[in-house]
Image (tube, helix red, strand yellow):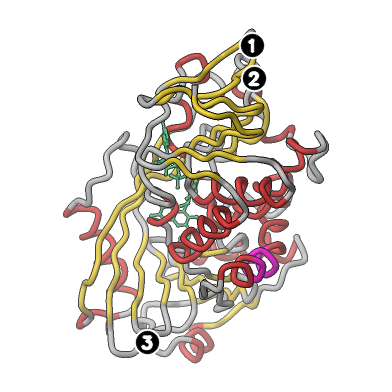
Amino acid sequence: MKESSDVVIIGAGIIGCAIAHRLAQQGLTVTIIDRGYPGGEASSAAAGMLAPQAEATHGLKGPFAELCLASHRLYPEFVAEIVEQTGIEIAYRKPGTLYVATDYVEAEALAGLLERQRAAGLPAEELTADEVRKFEPALAETVQVGVYLPEDHHVDNRRLIEALAVAAAQQGVRFITHTPVIDLMVEGDRAIGVRTPGGMIAGGIVVNAAGSWAGLVAPQLQKHIPVRPIRGQMLCLKQSTPSIRHLVYSGHCYLVPWPDGRTLVGATMENVGYDKRVTAQGIGHLLQAALALVPSLAGATITEMWAGLRPGTPDDRPILGRTPAVEMIVATGHFRNGILLAPITAKLISELITSGQPSLPLEPFAPTRFAE
Ligand SMILES: Cc1cc2nc3c(=O)[nH]c(=O)nc-3n(C[C@H](O)[C@H](O)[C@H](O)COP(=O)(O)OP(=O)(O)OC[C@H]3O[C@@H](n4cnc5c(N)ncnc54)[C@H](O)[C@@H]3O)c2cc1C
């Protein structure tokens, strides 16, 4: 048995690292274990959009929308705190999203999106084709209408996870990397630590933040943590100056411009199991969609292609709270919005652990909902 901590966290993605940092700030001893390295999976594959409004395909009311908007509000402070602590710049920007439609079906969907923003009292500007092209002159002639969402933001998620891991380590969090958790240590009906090939690590509380793999940590958990990986392929195009300035969404892809001339194109949504390959079909689809939207990207250099596994759940909502079969805390299933949801997840899970009273209700996200 290796030494014991107040809390043992499985998985050093953005969710595990953000929780570790918050708990250590409050004086708890924390060990975080990853079978790879911090941010090596979905958290570095992401596009970094903090876009609760563009992502609101199911509406902007209800517990999930509240969770996303609450996390969005926390972001400036979350980033400032980590930058101040570590000195690492994270490139938190506020470009806004321009959501566009190129045909009648997309225009109908966009009208619904606009309606939901207005019903929720959130800022959203309806744009004609001419106005869209004033916003983004490089957009194709096929764009018929658009909606501008000024409050959607962006962060360099790779820098963020790097800084978060440094900040957590500075707070005293112990990182054990390149070490898989192969089982839980259970006493009665409580997890009291984890088993690794190198021995056991005990913890007063175990937090499972293993992303798409959270349900595989121990077989008795799978019923309550039915996470399934949803592959997202992405590519990066480079120009001397970027063709666009805002985040651009269409029904077929999204584009994320960087001031240095890079434009990320994302992302596929594929239910293909634990397969992180980049495929000809996936990249072909993204390229076709991107060039149809911004023809001047045709001359850009392809500098990078990658894929990551989003932790999806049957109802597309995160899983946050205590598991009943074996008592442990779960924080996973953030699907398309884990970068956005990191600050609020860290806040609520640390409140659950330290006071038992999270400041937003966790019931809508409870692991028990899947067994009922
Ligand atoms: C292509 C793509 C684009 C995306 N774009 C965005 C976006 O723009 N905005 C946004 O908000 N979200 C986005 N997401 C979603 C976001 O990336 C995820 O929701 C988020 O990263 C999940 O974080 P996590 O910490 O739960 O999981 P992960 O980052 O996957 O971390 C889980 C960690 O657990 C470790 N682990 C697993 N099993 C074990 C084990 N048995 N023992 C030890 N360690 C283990 C893994 O090694 C990994 O490091 C995107 C995702 C993808 C794939």
Q: Position of residue 188 (x, y in %)?
A: 64, 8
Which numbered disc covers residue 138?
3
Q: Position of residue 76 (x, y in %)?
A: 67, 70
Per the image, the residue denoted by label 2 is: 327
Q: Position of residue 258 (x, y in %)?
A: 41, 79
* For residue 205, side relative to residue 197 (left or right): right
Circle nearer the N terminus (2, 3): 3
Circle nearer the N terminus (3, 1): 3
Ligand 1 near label 2 (Cβ, under 8 Å)? no
The amino acid type found where label 1 is placed reads Asp
Residue 98 visible from this viewpoint: no
The amino acid type found where label 2 is placed reads Glu
Q: Do residues under tags 2 and 1 come within 8 Å of each other at their CB atoms?
A: yes
Ligand 1 near label 1 (Cβ, under 8 Å)? no
Q: Residue at x 42, y 90 (%)?
A: 137
Magenta stretch in the rendered image: 75-81
Calculate the distance from the C-alpha at mark 3 to the C-alpha at mark 1: 59 Å
Q: Do residues under tags 2 and 3 come within 8 Å of each other at their CB atoms?
A: no
Circle nearer the N terminus (2, 1): 1
Along the viewing direction, whichever of 91 and 127 lies nearer the viewer:
91
Along the viewing direction, whichever of 42 and 106 lies nearer the viewer:
42
Q: Secondary structure at mark 2?
A: loop
